[in-house]
Image: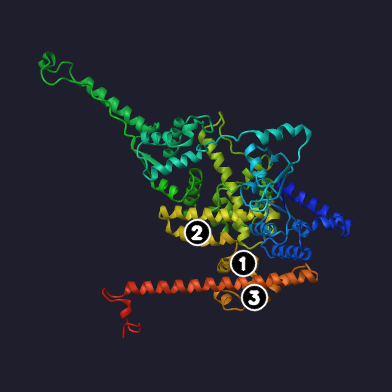
Amino acid sequence: SVLMFCATKDWCQQAACQVAGALAALAHADRGGEFQHMSCPLSADFEETKAKRIRTLEALRLSPGGLCPVLARTVPQGVAYHHAGLTTEERNIVEEGYRMGSILMLCATSTLAAGVNLPAKRVILRSLKAGNNSLDAGRFRQMAGRAGRAGFDSKGECLVMARRVELDTVRHLVFSDLSPLRSWLTGHQLARALLEVVALKLVSKVSEVMSLFHGATLRSKTEAAGADGESLSDELESCLQILYTNGFIHALDPKAIGVKTPSATNTQRATAVTQSQQAAQRPILSSAADVAGDGPPRTPPRPTAIDDTLHSTPLGDALVFSSLDPVAGQEVFSDLKRGLCGLRMDTDLHLVFLVAPVHSGIDPDWNHFAKLHSTMDEVSRQVAHLVGVNEGFLFQASCKAPSMSRSNPNETMKVRMERDREILVHKRFWVAMILTELLGEVPLAKVAAKYAVSRGQLQSLQTIAATFCGMVIQFCDRLKWWGLSAVLGSLQPRLSFGVAAELVPLVQLDSVHPAKARHLYDDGFTTLELLAASTERRIEESLLRLRALESYRPDAAAAKQKNSVIRADARRILREAKAAWDQQVQAGFDQAGTRAAMQAPAGVDSSDEEGSPGGR
């Protein structure tokens, strides 16, 4: 088994094609000679290995994304690629093929080294880069450490492909120490952590905040500065001010966190004027006692101590219990308030925008965005206008892509925040457009081609969006926006699978992806009950009709494996449908029993009712 790590996803696919092509050419030229003899130790039974690879190809054809053309070329030679561009199902199938021995070589990005447990006898590093960044000692050792299978090998091999001028870099990676741990408790992460400790009542005063973060965090021990070079104390004070300004926390005395509100300043000024007027009207010597010093001595009034008590607001509590960070929470709160005043229910687009992730990792193609916006239907254009999408902004962005800068000395913070919010609104609307297409059951491949994103990214986006939707629902519940919470609750399972509402019960089965669910639904299996009551042969015939629509025509050996895979798939679907339906029926019985027990008169046991074994 071999793992080849490449710098980019494109390099992975190119390397897999090159190796598979070389193996095919070598096998064709060898004609059962030396190469066939050398390959025998890798596969004790060539026919069995060939059958395994055909089954792997058939499983990939049955996956939601269909069979990738690159994998169709490489898997027959025992080679595959693995990166985030593949769907979850495709990655699972490739990993299973690698573990079972039908795939002997994987070309992958460096993320595989830190995630999936796939050891190899030999590791090859094709480049000293990961993406656009150079490898560091930690990532190098993660990849090299995959060499050597516990329980199978006594040693492993790691080969590094490098030019002569890079030899010193390789030596440095092999022998240098790992980088020290670094705290990421800064910026939004620090603000989120600060809001949590206040909302959970772990601290109630500013002094307690300082003591907690200075005494129990890695950053305080390493003395690392924040994103803008601020010390921990300065950044804590800045975060407190931001949380107070945005209404997430309340301070009894804003001066305790360094906030000077206009109202407080005006009050102090008015009090000072009143006191000076009273002093001017009072006589300098009011009585003889003032001269003689009789009576209690007069002392100047002591300055009032600043009350540094803190507590979270309902908005802050909603933010904490929904797990949203302050930036996402502010965006969601603003959009939800606007949606409460006018929500378009004749399209999914508006609802989807409300739960579109703030940090999705997908940036728009601004030029393409402007073109799509200009060709939208009237309802979608109205939704775009309601949420704040601006045609002038899109035109400017298509000429020069906007960026969210941290600071600009020529801009006020208010101007910078307004610009950043405008960028976020347009990015979220781009994501909402993608998700709306998926909810319309447009195939992954078509959506990927239209928006220039990989199928794996689309599937990850669905998962992130469904999770974010759950967070927004919790946010609405905490703010007691029950109606909006109920509407969004019906959207969450659809986002998870990318289907219309009627297909949700079917796609919740592990073996049924959206395209398969739509075919089964159109073939008469409109409910989970009907699917569970069917037979394995009936489901197999339905799946065969689905596969008959493909242009692919297998040979005799492949056809046999194809029928075997479909038969196993039908058996699995039926088993899962029966288990799910039995679970639903049992849940109904349990709920009915609980309701009957609650409605029974006090002192009467359910076992005493007529018809029960002990009640006669």
Q: CA distance from mark 3 to mark 2?
A: 33 Å
The spot of residue 288 in percent (x, y) is: 10, 15
Using the rendered view, name the quadrant where residue 211 is placed.
top left
Q: CA distance from mark 2 to mark 1?
A: 26 Å
Give the number of the mark in front: 2 or 1. Answer: 1
Give the number of the mark in front: 3 or 2. Answer: 3
Q: Which mark is residue 488?
A: 2
In the rendered view, would you say 500 is above or below 578?
Answer: above
CA neighbours of label 3 inside 10 A, class few (<14), some (14 to 19), many (20+): many
Secondary structure type for disc 3:
helix
Q: CB under 8 Å between callouts 2 and 1? A: no
Q: Which mark is residue 539?
A: 3
Q: CA distance from mark 3 to mark 1?
A: 12 Å
Q: What's under tag 2, amino acid-wise?
A: Leu
Q: Which mark is residue 511?
A: 1
Please give the name of the residue rendered at 26% of the width and 73% of the height, measured from the top-left corner. Answer: 602
Which is nearer the eye, 26 or 297?
26
Please give the name of the residue rendered at 58% of the width and 57% of the height, measured from the top-left corner. Answer: 349
Q: Which mark is residue 237?
A: none
The spot of residue 410 in percent (x, y) is: 56, 29
The spot of residue 565 in percent (x, y) is: 69, 69
Q: Quadrant of the C terminus?
A: bottom left
452 to the left or right of 258: right
Please give the name of the residue rendered at 70% of the width and 71% of the height, measured from the top-left corner. Answer: 564
Using the rendered view, name the quadrant where residue 161 is placed.
top right
Which is nearer the eye, 145 or 228?
145
Q: What's under tag 3, amino acid-wise?
A: Ile
Using the rendered view, name the quadrant where residue 72 is placed.
bottom right
Secondary structure type for disc 1:
loop
CA neighbours of label 2 inside 10 A, class few (<14), some (14 to 19), many (20+): many
Give the mark nearer the N terminus: 3 vs 2.
2
CA neighbours of label 1 inside 10 A, class few (<14), some (14 to 19), many (20+): some
